[in-house]
Amino acid sequence: MQKLLRRTALVKKQAARKAVASQGKSDSDDRKLRLNEQKLINLSVRHDTRAARFARREDWLLGPLASKRDAGGLQETYGTLDARRLRGVDKAKSQIKDWGIVEGDRVVVIQDGHREKGKIGKVREVRKEAEECFVTGLNRADVAIPDYLLLNEVDKTPVRPYEVPIPLSSVRLVAPLPQPETGALRDVVIQELRLKKTNYAQLSGDDPPTRFIAGVKPAIPIPYPDKEPEEFEDHDIDTLRIEVEERTFIPTLFQPPMPAGIIDELRNKYSKFRDRHDDAFIAKKMEEDRITEERKRSIRKMDTPLKELHRKERAERKAKGKPVVSEEVLAHIGELMAKNAVSDASSQSAMA
């Protein structure tokens, strides 16, 4: 039985090592994919920046003789944004920060140099993987729609206005808080939020953590925005609630809830990872271990006279215990040590 348990433990450790190696390879592939996506976005940004600088200089030098750029293939899409820049690159899981901003929150743009700085809007969508959000009515831009996306659509307009994502680090939550003096509600820009899990539902992940204003005592909780109730539409093929809640099985103590053989169908009976066994199997393995131990014990009885002598000598030495040094032996050892010390000192003086 111990051999079987040891084999199961070794197999589990090996599987865990393989899982770690596989996860490392998966993380490496995801990192390469993120780098490639970021490279494409950076290439698009550099291309647009260079083209804008060249056009600005050419317009300044040529004046009314400058060429007309919104013509030909760019007649309808000139000056638009690449569709690939509508979403950022996902970050690694270890680098993702929870900013505490969710859909429905009111935020203000605080990034220096941003065209929407100081404006307040409502968050329409949050992409935690890329740490960015879409704010309704803010940071809108004309986006060129690729031709293959317009094939199955009624609206063939190649340019459409979309909201470009804003990094979560560039926005701050705006919440109505009462003034200490008057008690009237006033919009307050919260510089930093602190998240804390205060109950079992939050610890289990069913509910989001409670939001507090960082650095403020006593702690001021910031409630989440109210979610709109979901509307469900009934259909003729839906199962009635009375049928769903009807109890069709009542367990008893006289019979198991399912046949004994079903557990072997759900869980591989011969799996090398199995660590829970039937009583009959355990009894069989214990009997095998007992027979093996008896065989080893019977082999020990077939010792040679030399082995029996060695065993007898070991038993006698063990019965005597540790040897005790007498006072005479200690005195003799002290005399020898003093004599050796005197001889060593005389030899060193002779050499000097």
Image (cartoon, helix red, strand yellow):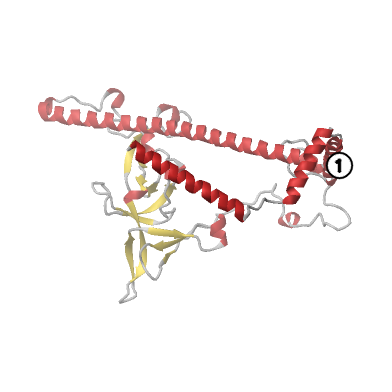
Q: Residue at x 10, y 27 (%)?
A: 61
Q: Residue at x 40, y 67 (%)?
A: 220
Q: Give the side of residue 310 with respect to residue 95, left or right.
A: right
Give the residue at the far bottom of this rendering: 181
* Image location (x, y in percent) of residue 175: 37, 62
* Image location (x, y in percent) of residue 70: 25, 28
Mark yes or no: residue 259 visible.
Answer: no
Q: Nearer the viewer, residue 324 or 90?
A: 324
* Image location (x, y in percent) of residue 15: 63, 36
* Image location (x, y in percent) of residue 323: 67, 50
Of helix, strand and loop, which one carries label 1? helix
Give the residue number, with chain letter if any, for mark 1: 287
Quadrant containing the N terminus in the rendered view: top right
Q: Give the side of residue 174 with respect to residue 258, left or right.
A: left
Report the label total. Answer: 1
Vertical relation: 155 (above or below) 166: above
Residue type at mark 1? Glu
Vertical relation: 13 (above or below) 176: above
Quarter of image, res 52: top left
Q: Residues within 10 Å of mark 1 (few under 14, many from 20)?
A: few
Quarter of image, res 276: top right
Vertical relation: 180 (above or below) 89: below
Q: Nearer the viewer, residue 146 or 91?
A: 91
Quadrant containing the C terminus in the rendered view: top left
Q: Give the side of residue 347 with respect to residue 19, left or right.
A: left
Q: Residue at x 44, y 40 (%)?
A: 92
Mark yes or no: residue 340 visible.
Answer: yes
Q: Residue at x 83, y 43 (%)?
A: 286
